[in-house]
Image (cartoon, rainbow, N blue to C red):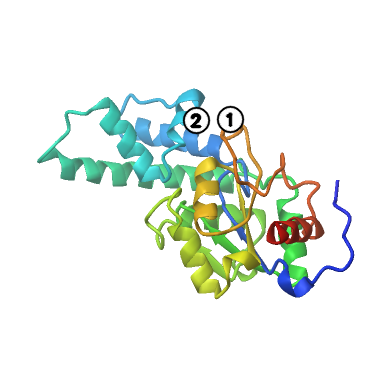
Amino acid sequence: MSARTPKNIDWDLMLKALIFDVDGTLADTESAHRAAFNHAFAEEGLDWVWDEALYIELLDISGGKERIAHYWKRTRADIVGIEAHSLQDTIVRLHELKTAAYEGMVNDGVVSLRPGVLRLIESAHEQGLALAIATTTSPVNIAALLRKAIGAHWRSLFGVVEDASTAPRKKPHPQVYLQTLQRMGMASSDCMAIEDSSNGLQAALAAGLPTVITPNSFTAHHRFEGALRVVPDLGDTTVADLRIWHSQARAA
């Protein structure tokens, strides 16, 4: 239910920008990502199969290449020295296959935006809030998802997009948020992050951002201490709600 707008708010001190994570926040992408990883493993002739329980565990590692490397080292700790270069080449090839498979699934309509996301983005844009994306996923994944869900004009809605290509240090490191704020030319106190995971929350908080969490089936077990709000999705959340929560955080 939408919050009631309190009286005597100084709107000049309130919310000026929203910064969105992508995977799990804008859309329930993780099932498609898991399927794409498994497709890549099969294409490369590996006998790996990541079931849902394992994938939930692996999501603690941010970044697709980093996730593959972590799993490979965990299962093949003997790979050292001269094999390291070959290993990295294989990881890059696996990730390319995975990315292509994921993009195909998105284009086939397998992935859609979570409840309330598009409405909130459009409403915030109409009300003059700056919008940005801060994610550890690849630019190809972002473009595939938002082009399909929003349309070819999606990029015009977001003044800043920071991703794995521009911020290589993955969440929970705050690099992607710090760079987003720098490019936006805004103070963290004027902005709000929207995330779905504990790694994302830690990254946003480390950058000084009040953060709203919308967990999903892959992150529901995470701990979200320090979050401004935890809501099941954005279906009932309005820009007015976000403004009020942000104002309350600044007054605390």
- In the drawing, does residue 240 fall left or right of residue 132? right
Q: Residue furthest front?
A: 252
Pointers 1 and 2 in contact (C-beta within 8 Å): yes
The C terminus: image quadrant: bottom right
> Mark 1 falls on what kind of element?
loop
The residue labelled by disc 1 is 221
Residue 39, how many percent across, how many down?
Answer: 42, 34
Task: Determine whether, in the image, residue 73 is placed left or right of residue 197.
Answer: left
Spot occupied by residue 90 in the image (x, y as percentages of width and height): 26, 41
Instruction: Say what amino acid the circle numbered 1 marks.
Output: His
Residue beneath label 2, please?
A: 56
* Residue 31 in view, yes or no: yes
Residue depicted at 23% across the width and 46% down the height? 89
Image point 78% across, 71% down: which residue?
11
> Total of numbered circles in the picture?
2
Label drawn at residue 25: none
> From where the camera sits, is residue 153 visible?
no
| Residue 44 pos. (x, y %) | 31, 34
In this rendering, the answer to whether 235 lies above or below 147 is above
Q: Which of marks 1 and 2 is nearer the N terminus?
A: 2
Under tag 2, what secondary structure?
helix
**What residue is at 55 percent from the left and 68 percent from the top?**
160
* Residue type pointed to by label 2: Ile
